[in-house]
């Protein structure tokens, strides 16, 4: 078989176990474990006055109840601020169990451990907590108004003021031929993986060692956090991410309180303890994202070219800031997208509210940034009477301008320098794919069917693959099996397949011989995690480099045996052979055996490496100075800075003017993530991202009431799309290799979701002729909008746009 | 008439008679996973909306989180672990829809997959039982088969594709068998 | 979350069921399909002391389609009713409405009668029972009684039946001669509870002029509502009928609440739109049936 696998749509090896029900997800582990359940705050903001557990004590099967008073040492301290930043002037984090004050509905107050989950919930229901309610702050506008403070010592509710500028924006605006200013909003959604979080801990009292399974995106860092908080030596803690049922960002946050409390209980009780998050818990105690208020002023010339951009964003960070200001930074820096903006100033005020914490959800601030910039482009187009695609084209960074320095600082602390791209190419492909210029006819056709048709587009640039590093380990065994490990975790992205493809390609071995392990600290201790579309870029390059190291050593050893120069050797199908000399070869597995000089043989293969197996060179030690036994290599990839993927989406919507139901009837994607390792997997990522984008634009929102109660904390009312709500997607690819990494890769994981709201808002606006200044939008809101005389009417450049004249308007 | 807090139930699970003693409030999903060790059935919401926990009771897809374990006493249950069949040599043959999910990249994290597989397999088997498997599957049929399950990874495009692919495999099988006769 | 503790009985006769409901008192609840009850138990929003599972009661999975109407037994699953050609022949609204109930896996387990007893004003079958002027048969310790829909539905999730009782069946009168029906709803996602739904019946006379137009709505009131819209279209042919006027009339008759998914105003809009659209379809069907019959 061929070993040239890079770029092939290789079928996933993960699937073999997953399609027969043999996956191993968190709740599948620990059949005999005790179960933990949590009593969580029913109030959005309250003082915990008293906790009375007496009612629960008689529950048969109850094993332990923990409150804040039971926490000791570092566990009794606030949870870590994972990503400190000088502009995060007022970081706040909660405690594993609430200390004096609860700051959002769902905050953990008491942990109960019992023989099973049913019993644990019975006991939890009998614990009485007395609260004294405090004033509640919900929503970015209330936080901004600061009539009440979320945290007593932060009276203006501002956690951070993030600020970047590339020139004197006031001067540039004053010099602009035209300016316009507007305000818009993006609402809250959430990652909402099908599998919630979960933690299983097993304490080995004899070894004084802890093994923790957790449904995480960052096992190495969870390990470090547990060791620090439970005061264990790092080598006594193992953390494993088993099969993880989706992450999309929410599982990058750590340590979640449960990731500390479950191990704590396992140690205290001397028994396995497991907590499996249920759906309601996930809604009210995991993380959300996306709410922002965006105040935008743009300057532009007669031709619609942007001359200055001034953006002030109010970002709702929820009750605490464990993940720092990553989302504000990402929004601020990714906002400018594929455009050359001469002078740009951005300020993001990150504010506290009495709601669930806000941490990255696929896109992580980019969808909002894209919404700001792309809606700005639409406004300029409308103001100047220029086609929306044309305005974008006039502002695009051109192919000969790369590398392009945006003079901003990215989430990795490194400069935003676009490494490569072809944005003009994206636009050309997109217009062809959606048939942009035929909208007039299509609009007329839809009108004949009694429907309003609109078209919209949005473009984005996505910084992917931020450092600091990932590592890979590749080892060839005497059996010929190739073991690959990387510390970064998987949540369904097909890493086992992609990394095996890369190693098989680099090493010249059949893919079936390659076994990949991810996210297991027993196998690889150094890692950062899976987020920011970085797995393929970071661990992909790391395992490829590790494989190259193995290859080099294999050739060196084989060269000795074959009496040839390493440069004259090739590895194909697991066989090292002299180029052009058939028959002169040695299996890689034999090289692996020879790489480890042995005293003791235990099988036929090992015999070849023992001291009397053949004549040796007595002038040298069996293992050369500076060399190591074994055919293995560990390597790391640490990028100088992030690499920038890009893309463009276009949508066609049809709207029923008698019900205001919105159908996305066409969705086109042009996508550039550099070189593609497995196009089948990349397309799958795009499909999934688009579905989340459509969900975020038309269906999903976290609906808090003024008391901070989440009104739709179930799949009945939080409207994640079924198949019936996701449009068919057509995709075109463009491959602009990254010059920054050996494989030329850029990230692909998040891209699909980024432009959804921007493109769909543009299309709806085009269809109904009313300004869409907040997303998501539902039929009932669209109905309100079209009836409201105050709503901006959009003067569309298309004279065929139907005037709205329906019964609904009367 | 006694009112019980706990019961011993007999269920044929994936063709194998099983017995379990469960509190009467135990959900079928939990009993399958924790009493019987069949962890292929996944729990995604526990309010019957996501469909991850869908199993076949007497061959018919139902949400196992919306049934009590005691309710299947005396009945047969098929979970994702039971979709494959033994072949003549005693090996396991996957259901065409399982093969198709892999072939069409219809799963990513795999958490919702068991519920989709049981639902679609039952639907395609029912088509075959009704003699309709020689007719090309319609888009409406596909929508009906995949429409009640939530997936957060795939955007459903490849799930629909896999559904069509499996139907086509079964159609070809039946046509071949008919031709052979 | 997991259900709180409860006791469980699965009687095999109606008498046994009534006995155990009597002895267990107010905390006892009947379990049929469970597709609405189980989520409430799992969220601990309902905590009955005893569940009386009627799934083992014999003889309740019948669909009797007679000239007068369709009688649907308490253990008939939505899927079975949806598949019943006989039922559709007598009262087409049954299948038309049932097709909108959730998704197939829910329809395989949930029962038509159970959804009526659940008395959710956003449920399809409650509206159909109302629109067809149907009734339910209730077994009580004093013997079976028949309760008409107006008396049965008291409030959201509330019926007039108290104390030990098992609803044995629901009866949906047949579609009258020279009549047509239609059913439509708007839901946020396919299979969700309707934001608004409408079922209608239109009847014409021998001259194919409209004599009656009635509509029932989902998710617009506390209990199912039936509105007579005849005045807006009476005496007209279906081709000349001003269905929009009927929609406008309906819009003025309803008084919906707003919620997360729809404002009250939006619901009124949907009442008008769905009324107009379904009446047009039902009118066309009424004419077709009238012509077929003559």
Image: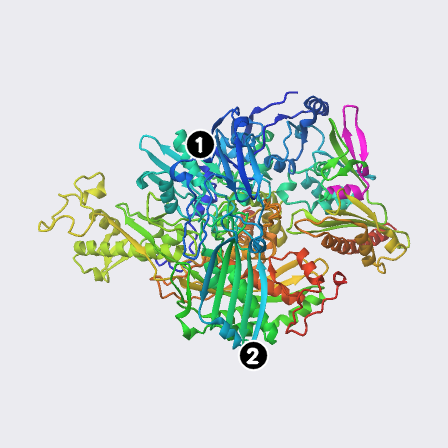
Circle 1/circle 2 CB separation < 8 Å: no
* Relative horizontal placement of residue C278, taking residue A130 as reference (left or right): right
Span highlighted in magenta in the image: C125-150
Q: Quadrant of the C terminus of chain A?
A: bottom right
Q: Residues within 10 Å of mark 1 (few under 14, many from 20)?
A: some
Residue A151 appearing in the image: yes
Where does the image place residue C277, in percent across and percent down from the top left?
Answer: 77, 56
Q: C198 above or below A304?
A: above
Residue B58 appearing in the image: no
Camera-near label (1 vs 2) is 2
Sequence order check, earlier mark of 1 and 2: 1
The extreme left residue here reads A619
Foreground of the two, B70 or A535: A535
Circles 1 and 2 on the same subunit: yes
Q: CA distance from mark 1 to mark 2?
A: 69 Å
- Which residue appears at 53% of the width and 68% of the height? A430
- Which residue appears at 76% of the width and 42% of the height? C223
* Relative horizontal placement of residue A789, taking residue A149 as reference (left or right): right
Q: Is residue C137 magenta?
A: yes
Residue B29 is labelled as: none
Where does the image place residue B147, in percent across and percent down from the top left?
Answer: 60, 49
Provide the secondary structure element on which disc 1 rests. Answer: loop
Q: Residues within 10 Å of mark 2 (few under 14, many from 20)?
A: few
Residue A33 is labelled as: 1
Foreground of the two, A242 or A225: A225
Q: A320 above or below A405?
A: above
Residue A302 is labelled as: 2
Q: Is residue A640 magenta?
A: no
Where does the image place residue A767, in percent across and percent down from the top left?
Answer: 65, 66
């Amino acid at each position: 078989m061929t070993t040239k696998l890079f770029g092939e749509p290789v079928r996933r090896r993960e699937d073999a176990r997953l399609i027969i029900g043999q996956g191993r997800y968190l709740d599948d582990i620990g059949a005999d474990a005790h179960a933990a359940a949590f009593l969580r705050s029913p109030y959005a903001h309250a003082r915990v006055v008293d906790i009375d557990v007496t009612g629960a004590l008689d529950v048969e099967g109850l094993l332990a109840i923990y409150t804040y008073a039971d926490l000791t040492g570092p566990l009794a301290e606030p949870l870590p601020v994972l990503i400190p930043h000088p502009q995060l002037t007022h970081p706040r984090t909660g405690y594993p169990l609430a200390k004096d004050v609860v700051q959002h509905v769902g905050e953990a107050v008491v942990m109960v451990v019992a023989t099973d989950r049913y019993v644990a919930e019975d006991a939890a229901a009998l614990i009485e907590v007395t609260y004294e309610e405090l004033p509640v702050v919900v929503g970015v506008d209330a936080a901004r108004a600061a009539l009440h403070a979320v945290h007593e010592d932060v009276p203006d509710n501002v956690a951070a003021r993030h600020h970047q500028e590339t020139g004197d924006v006031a001067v540039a605006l004053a010099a602009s031929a035209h300016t316009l200013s507007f305000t818009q909003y993006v609402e809250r959604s959430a990652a909402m993986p099908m599998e919630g979080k979960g933690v299983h801990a097993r304490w080995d009292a004899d070894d004084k060692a802890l093994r923790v399974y957790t449904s995480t995106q960052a096992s190495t860092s969870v390990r470090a956090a547990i060791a620090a908080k439970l005061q264990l030596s790092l080598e006594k803690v193992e953390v494993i991410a088993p099969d993880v049922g989706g992450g999309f960002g929410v599982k990058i946050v750590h340590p979640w309180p449960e990731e500390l409390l479950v191990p704590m209980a396992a140690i205290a009780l001397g028994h396995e303890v497991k907590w499996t998050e249920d759906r309601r818990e996930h809604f009210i105690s995991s993380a959300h994202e996306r709410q922002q208020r965006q105040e935008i002023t743009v300057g532009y010339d007669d031709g619609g070219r942007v001359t200055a951009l001034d953006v002030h964003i109010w970002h709702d960070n929820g009750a605490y800031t464990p993940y720092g200001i990553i989302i504000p930074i990402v929004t601020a820096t990714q906002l400018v997208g594929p455009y050359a903006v001469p002078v740009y100033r951005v300020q993001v005020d990150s504010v506290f509210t009495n709601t669930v914490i806000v941490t990255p959800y696929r896109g992580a601030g980019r969808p909002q940034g894209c919404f700001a910039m792309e809606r700005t482009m639409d406004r300029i187009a409308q103001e100047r009477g220029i086609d929306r695609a044309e305005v974008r084209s006039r502002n695009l960074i051109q192919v000969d301008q790369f590398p392009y320095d945006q003079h901003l600082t990215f989430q990795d602390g490194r400069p935003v320098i676009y490494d490569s791209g072809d944005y003009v190419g994206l636009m050309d492909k997109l217009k062809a794919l959606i048939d942009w210029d035929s909208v007039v006819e299509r609009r007329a056709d839809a009108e004949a069917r009694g429907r309003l048709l609109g078209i919209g587009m949005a473009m984005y640039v996505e910084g992917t693959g931020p450092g600091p590093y990932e590592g890979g380990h590749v080892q060839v065994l005497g059996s010929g099996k190739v073991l690959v490990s990387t510390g970064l975790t998987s949540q369904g992205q097909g890493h086992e397949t992609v990394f095996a493809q890369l190693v098989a390609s680099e090493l010249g071995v059949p893919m079936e011989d390659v076994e990949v392990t991810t996210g297991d600290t027993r196998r690889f201790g150094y890692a950062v995690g899976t987020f920011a579309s970085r797995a393929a870029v970071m661990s992909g390059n790391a395992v490829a480099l590790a494989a190259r190291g193995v290859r080099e050593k294999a050739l060196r050893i084989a060269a000795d045996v074959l009496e040839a120069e390493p440069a004259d050797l090739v590895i194909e199908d697991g066989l090292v052979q002299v180029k052009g000399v058939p028959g002169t070869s040695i299996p890689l597995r034999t090289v692996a055996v020879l790489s480890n000089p042995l005293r003791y043989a235990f099988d036929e293969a090992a015999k070849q490496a023992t001291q009397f197996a053949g004549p040796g060179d007595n002038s040298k030690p069996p293992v050369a100075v500076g060399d190591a036994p074994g055919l293995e290599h560990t390597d790391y990839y640490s990028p100088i800075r992030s690499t920038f993927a890009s893309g463009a989406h276009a949508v066609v919507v049809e709207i029923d003017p008698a019900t205001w139901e919105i159908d996305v009837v066409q969705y086109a994607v042009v996508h550039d993530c550099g070189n593609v390792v497995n196009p089948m997997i990349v397309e799958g990522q795009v499909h999934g991202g688009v579905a989340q984008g459509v969900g975020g634009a038309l269906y999903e929102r976290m609906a808090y009431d003024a008391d901070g109660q989440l009104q739709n904390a179930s799949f009945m009312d939080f409207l994640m799309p079924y198949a019936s709500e996701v449009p068919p997607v057509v995709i075109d690819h463009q491959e602009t290799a990254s010059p920054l990494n050996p494989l030329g890769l850029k990230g692909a994981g998040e891209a699909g979701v980024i432009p959804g709201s921007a493109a769909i808002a543009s299309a709806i606006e085009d269809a109904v002729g009313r300004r869409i200044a907040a997303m998501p939008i539902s039929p009932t809101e669209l109905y309100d909008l079209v009836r409201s005389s105050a709503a901006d009417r959009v003067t569309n450049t298309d004279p065929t746009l139907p005037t709205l004249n329906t019964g609904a308007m009367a | 008439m006694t009112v019980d807090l706990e019961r011993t139930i007999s269920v044929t699970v994936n063709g194998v008679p099983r017995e379990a003693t469960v509190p009467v409030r135990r959900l079928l999903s939990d009993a399958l996973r924790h009493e019987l060790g069949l962890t292929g059935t996944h729990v995604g919401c526990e309010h019957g909306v996501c469909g991850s926990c869908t199993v076949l009771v007497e061959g018919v897809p139902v949400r196992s989180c919306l049934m009590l374990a005691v309710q299947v006493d005396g009945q047969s249950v098929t979970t994702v672990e039971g979709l494959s069949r033994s072949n003549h040599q005693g090996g396991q043959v996957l259901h065409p829809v399982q093969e198709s999910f892999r072939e069409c990249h219809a799963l990513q994290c795999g958490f919702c997959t068991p519920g989709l597989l049981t639902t679609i397999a039952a639907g395609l088997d029912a088509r075959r039982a009704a003699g309709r498997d020689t007719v090309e599957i319609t888009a409406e049929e596909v929508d009906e088969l995949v429409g009640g399950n939530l997936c957060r990874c795939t955007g459903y495009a490849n799930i629909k594709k896999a559904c069509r692919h499996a139907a086509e495999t079964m159609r070809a099988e039946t046509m071949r068998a008919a031709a052979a006769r | 979350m997991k259900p709180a503790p409860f006791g469980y009985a699965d009687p095999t006769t109606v008498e046994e069921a009534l006995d155990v409901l009597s002895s267990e008192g107010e905390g006892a609840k009947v379990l049929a399909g469970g597709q609405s009850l189980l989520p409430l138990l799992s969220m601990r929003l309902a905590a009955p002391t005893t569940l009386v599972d009627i799934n083992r009661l014999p003889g309740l999975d019948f669909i009797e389609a007679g000239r007068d109407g369709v009688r649907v037994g308490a253990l008939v699953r939505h899927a079975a009713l949806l598949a019943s050609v006989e039922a559709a022949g007598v009262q087409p609204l049954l299948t038309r409405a049932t097709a909108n109930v959730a998704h197939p896996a829910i329809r395989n387990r949930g029962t038509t009668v159970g959804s009526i007893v659940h008395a959710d004003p956003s449920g399809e079958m409650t509206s159909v029972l109302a629109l067809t002027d149907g009734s339910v048969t209730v077994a009580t310790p004093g013997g079976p009684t028949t309760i008409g829909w107006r008396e049965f539905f008291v409030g959201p999730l509330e019926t007039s039946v108290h104390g030990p009782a098992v609803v044995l069946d629901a009866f949906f009168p047949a579609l009258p001669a020279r009549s047509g029906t239609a059913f439509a709803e708007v839901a946020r996602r396919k299979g969700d509870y309707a934001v608004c739904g409408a079922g209608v019946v239109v009847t014409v006379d021998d001259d194919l002029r409209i004599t009656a137009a009635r509509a029932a709505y989902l998710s617009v009131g506390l209990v199912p509502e039936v509105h007579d819209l005849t005045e807006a279209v009476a005496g007209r042919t279906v081709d000349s009928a001003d269905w929009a006027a009927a929609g406008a009339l309906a819009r003025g008759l309803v008084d919906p609440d707003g919620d997360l998914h729809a404002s009250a105003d939006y619901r009124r809009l949907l009442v008008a739109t769905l009324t107009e659209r379904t009446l047009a379809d039902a009118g066309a069907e009424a004419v077709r049936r009238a012509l077929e019959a003559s």
